[in-house]
């Protein structure tokens, strides 16, 4: 097992406090897109949740080639600013899942 060579898939499923279609929701989702430009982020995708089996509204998925790149993303000023300026006040509930491929 070599932690430096694994691929990590980072998934966040969330429910916003903002009304659907509101300016606040639009600002939040525009800010989300800036996360895709942080170095190390691969295959960034946003999703609208369609299942009736849970109360979440949206999902984000991105991949990292290594735990080092994932940690650098978490500490990056753009990510930290997003958490401070948008996430803390805008998200009602969330689930975060980080996966590594099974060998």
Image (spheres, grey):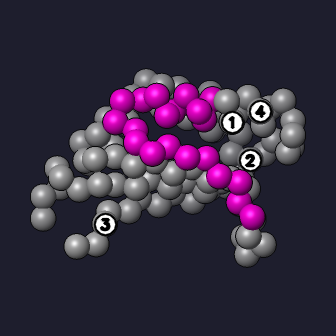
For image coordinates 61% across by 47% down, the residue present is 46
Contact? badges 4 and 1 (CB < 8 Å): yes
Q: Which mark is residue 26?
A: 4
For image coordinates 75% across by 64% down, the residue present is 50
Badge 4 element: helix
* Residue to which mark 3 is pinned: 101
* Residue to which mark 2 is pinned: 16
Range covered by the magenta-colored residues: 31-50
2 vs 1, front mark: 1
Q: Distance between the Cα atoms at labels 2 and 1?
A: 10 Å
Please indicate, yes or no, whether residue 53 appears anywhere in the rendered image.
Answer: yes
Q: Distance between the Cα atoms at labels 1 and 3?
A: 28 Å
For image coordinates 77% across by 33% down, the residue present is 26
Residue at the limit of the structure toward the front, as seen here: 43
Q: Which mark is residue 102?
A: none
For image coordinates 12% across by 65% down, the residue present is 1
Left or right, 43 with respect to 60, comes to left
* Residue to which mark 1 is pinned: 29
Q: Position of residue 75 (x, y in %)?
A: 37, 33
Badge 1 element: helix
């Amino acid at each position: 097992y070599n932690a430096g060579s694994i691929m990590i898939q980072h998934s966040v499923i969330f429910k916003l406090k903002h009304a659907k279609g509101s300016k606040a929701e639009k600002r939040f989702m525009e800010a989300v897109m800036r996360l895709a430009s942080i170095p190390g982020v691969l295959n960034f995708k946003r999703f609208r949740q369609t299942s009736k089996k849970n109360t979440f509204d949206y999902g984000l998925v991105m991949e990292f080639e290594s735990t080092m790149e994932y940690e650098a993303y978490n500490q990056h000023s753009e990510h930290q600013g997003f958490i401070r300026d948008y996430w803390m006040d805008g998200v009602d509930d969330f689930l975060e899942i980080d996966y590594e491929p099974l060998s």
